[in-house]
Image (cartoon, helix red, strand yellow):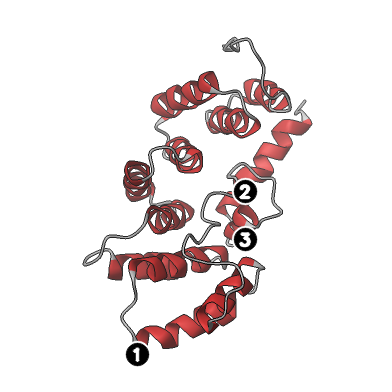
Amino acid sequence: MLCNGFLMNIWQIEMERSPYSNTLLFNRNTKLSLSIGLLLLFPALVQGADSLYDQQILQARQGQYAPFLSYLQQYQLRHALTPSQVADWLQVALWAGQDDEVVKVWRRYQVYMPLPARGTAAAAQALRNQKQWQTSLTLWQQALSQAPGSDDYRIGYIKTLADARKDGEALSEARRLVAEQASVAHLQTLSYVYLRLAKAGTSCWWTRRSSIVNRKTKPRWPA
């Protein structure tokens, strides 16, 4: 009989594949496995924004994506975009579930300007949504080389390994993640990998353990 955690993980896989997954994965209120930090921050944005551009960014962070995307479409016709602005475009388009737009914009701009890690990660996630596993993995690696300490990019990379059926590497990386810190996000990542391996019982076991944070003992790996 399937446990509730396993059913939850099946739902999670289906939602990550759906056209609406980006809104769910990157909404500030979500509790899904990819945390808020992945593609939520705009480093150049200051509190009390007084420009139209910054106001549109603030609206996008509140879930109103269309005004910013429409504004930027017109803005880029009259102005050369900075790498940070392109990254903003990629992020918001991803939140809006516009994977094709993300990939198109990334391909256009990555040729002649270095993009911030957050823009690279947005493209990696969009390509993952499109099941372009190998290109997605390459971009996750690039994002990690730009931001080696990003837990979110690392999780995205591991999940894409699992999606691509690179089973051994995905399991090894997920286990290493949990061994470093048995956080909820890390345990859920390992559970996701086991689910992609079709080990339902093991996935349930790790899903239940994901409610335990800051354990002092190293976990025993189930068969």
Residue 112, image x and y in percent?
A: 21, 67
Question: For the residues carrying marks 3 and 1, which lies nearer the camera in this image?
Answer: 1
Foreground pick, 211 / 145: 145
Q: From mark 3 to mark 1, how far is it between C-alphas?
A: 29 Å
Is residue 78 toward the left or the right of residue 98 in the image? left
Query: Residue at 50% of width from left, 62% of height from top?
Result: 42
Q: From mark 2 to mark 1, how far is it between C-alphas?
A: 40 Å
Q: Earlier in the sequence, mark 2 or mark 3?
A: 2
Residue 171, image x and y in percent?
A: 47, 24
- Above or below residue 30? Residue 87 is below
- Above or below residue 100? Residue 131 is above
Q: What residue type is labelled 3?
A: Thr
Q: Which of marks 3 and 1 is nearer the N terminus?
A: 3
Q: What element carries label 3?
A: helix
Q: How crowded is mark 3: few (under 14 residues within 10 Å), some or many (20 or more)?
A: some
Query: Residue at 66% of width from left, 45% of height from top?
Result: 32
Is residue 151 toward the left or the right of residue 119 in the image? right
Q: What residue type is labelled 1?
A: Arg
Q: Looking at the rendered structure, which numbered label has been put on residue 23?
A: 3
Quadrant hosting residue 203: top right
Q: Earlier in the sequence, mark 2 or mark 1?
A: 2
Residue 39, image x and y in percent?
A: 51, 55
Q: Is mark 1 on a helix, strand or loop?
A: helix
Foreground pick, 219 / 196: 219
Q: Mark 2 points at which residue?
A: 14
Q: Mark 1 points at which residue?
A: 78
